[in-house]
Each structure stands twice: as C-alpha cells, then as structure tokens.
Image (cartoon, grey):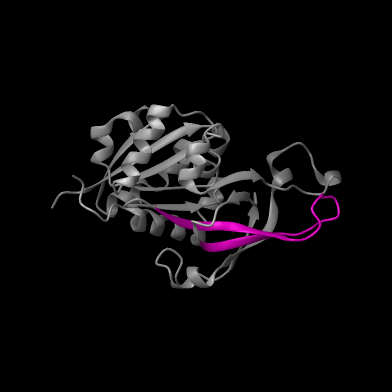
C-alpha cells in the first residue's frame, strides 16, 4: 500500500517555535501512515509535481511573505484535493499582505487582547488571558471535535476576521473589559473547517506555545484535523 504524503512547511516568526512545534506532530503523522517531507520555506508550493503528490500540507509560518507563484501553486493543489491545516499564527497570521491567501483560509488574525495595562510587563505573557473554547452544535457532530467538551486555556486568545464560508466547530468570546474600546462581548471562530474545491482546510487558533499544543484538547483537535483534511480524492 502506498503511504500518504504529508508536507510540513515551516518558518516565519521564531516566537511560535515553528521547528519544535511541528516536530511535536511527526510521530503522529508517521504512525498514521504518512511519509513526511519537511521544507523550511514556501518555494515548494510552486513545484506543481511535488504538490500534486501531496495529500496533506501542515503549515506553520507566522507572518512572512509568499510570492504569487507560490500561492497559486498552493491554491491549485488544495482545489485539486490536497488537505491544508495548521494552528495559531502559522496558518491565520501568515502572509499578511496577501488578500488571496486570506480568501483561501477564510479567517485572519486581527489581534489578541491583553491584560489590563497596569498588569503588563512588556512580555508575551501580557497577552495571556484565561478563556473558554466553546464547541458549537456543528462541532459536537464533526469528526474533528466530536466528544470534546468546552475547555479552558490561558494563552493568547485570537480575535479573527472571517467570512460565512467557514464551518465553525468552536468559538471563543472576548469580553468587553473596561480598558478595551469595544462595548459588548465579541464571539469569533476558534476552530473551523473550509471546503475549497476538492480540498479540505482545518484551522485551529490555539497554539501559541508548546504547552498549549500539548494540551490534550488542542492536540486532539489538531491531530484529528490532519486526518480529516487529508486528500479524499485520487491525485491525477
């Protein structure tokens, strides 16, 4: 039996630990029958032959840039059935200058609200807040999140801008705190899927640090998302 082909593409802002974060999932991918290729930059996206033979792309690239040729190659592969998944800034804070990438993924990081100003110390932890990930009714039935109950985290809580083509499996709500400029709670997607052509996309917004990725709920969602997103149509 031919093994499934997974491509990990990682890089960008080092604060998200792209190497260490992706290597957390190598044993799972290999034990699930994948042959894994790792690339440290996005040039591979423009290689049509390589992408046509890829069943799953796991991307962990925060910020950074992508060329039109690379994005076109990635998009064409997904439309033809290659799965695409990732977590946190590695997928929803990638390639900020590309509106076409935003259109592909269906949601984009906008901010992560922080602590009260008097509590901030100029560290990443200034943006770590306790919050709840709420599984939606759709999420309770979906293979990626079925059986997972609402769970709490204390880390960056992503506020994302999004469209109606995503299928929201979990949400999180930003409260209206006295030091913030918004005047009512705002609920945004925390986990979603998206069908794009013949391809499946899965986005998990928690995952700022290794300890969050090792949270049993977060890790389960990411691993299930890898399997669910994997190509379901024969590569031509």
Q: Name the residue located 33 percent from the left edge and 29 percent from the top edge.
A: 46
Q: Which residues are magenta?
A: 168-195
In the image, residue 224 above or below residue 99: below
Q: Nearer the viewer, residue 146 or 96?
A: 96
In the image, residue 229 above or below residue 141: above
- Which quarter of the rendering shows the C terminus? top left
Does the magenta segment cover residue 187? yes
Left or right of 185 in this view: 12? left
Q: Nearer the viewer, residue 105 or 209?
A: 105
Answer whether residue 208 is visible to the viewer in this image.
no
Q: Main secondary structure of the magenta part?
A: strand
Answer whether residue 123 is visible to the viewer in this image.
yes
Q: Name the residue located 46 percent from the left edge and 29 percent from the top edge.
A: 66
| Residue 10 rendering spot, x and y as whole percentages | 43, 35
| Residue 136 rendering spot, x and y as whole percentages | 54, 69
| Residue 123 rendering spot, x and y as whole percentages | 72, 38
Left or right of 181 in this view: 155? left
Q: Name the residue located 44 percent from the left edge and 53 percent from the top edge.
A: 202
Q: Name the residue located 68 percent from the left edge and 46 percent from the top edge.
A: 112
Q: Nearer the viewer, residue 194 or 151?
A: 194
């Amino acid at each position: 039996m031919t093994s499934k082909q997974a491509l990990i593409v990682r890089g960008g802002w080092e604060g998200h630990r792209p190497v260490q974060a992706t290597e957390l999932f190598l044993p799972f991918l290999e034990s699930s029958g994948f042959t894994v290729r790792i690339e440290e930059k996005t040039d591979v996206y423009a290689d049509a032959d390589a992408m046509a033979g890829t069943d799953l792309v796991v991307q962990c690239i925060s910020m950074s840039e992508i060329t039109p040729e690379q994005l076109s190659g990635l998009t064409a592969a997904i439309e033809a059935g290659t799965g695409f998944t990732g977590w946190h800034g590695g997928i929803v804070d990638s390639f900020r200058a590309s509106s076409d990438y935003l259109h592909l993924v269906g949601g984009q990081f906008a901010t992560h609200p922080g602590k009260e100003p008097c509590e901030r110390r100029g560290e990443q932890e200034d943006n770590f807040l306790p919050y709840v990930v709420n599984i939606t009714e759709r999420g309770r039935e979906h293979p990626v999140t079925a059986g997972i109950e609402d769970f709490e985290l204390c880390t960056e809580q992503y506020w994302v801008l999004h469209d109606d083509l995503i299928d929201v499996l979990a949400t999180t709500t930003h409260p209206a705190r006295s030091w913030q400029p918004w005047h009512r709670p705002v609920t945004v997607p925390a986990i979603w899927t998206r069908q794009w052509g013949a391809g499946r996309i899965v986005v998990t917004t928690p995952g700022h640090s290794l300890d969050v990725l090792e949270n049993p709920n977060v890790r389960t969602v990411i691993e299930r998302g890898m399997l669910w997103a994997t190509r379901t149509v024969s590569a031509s």
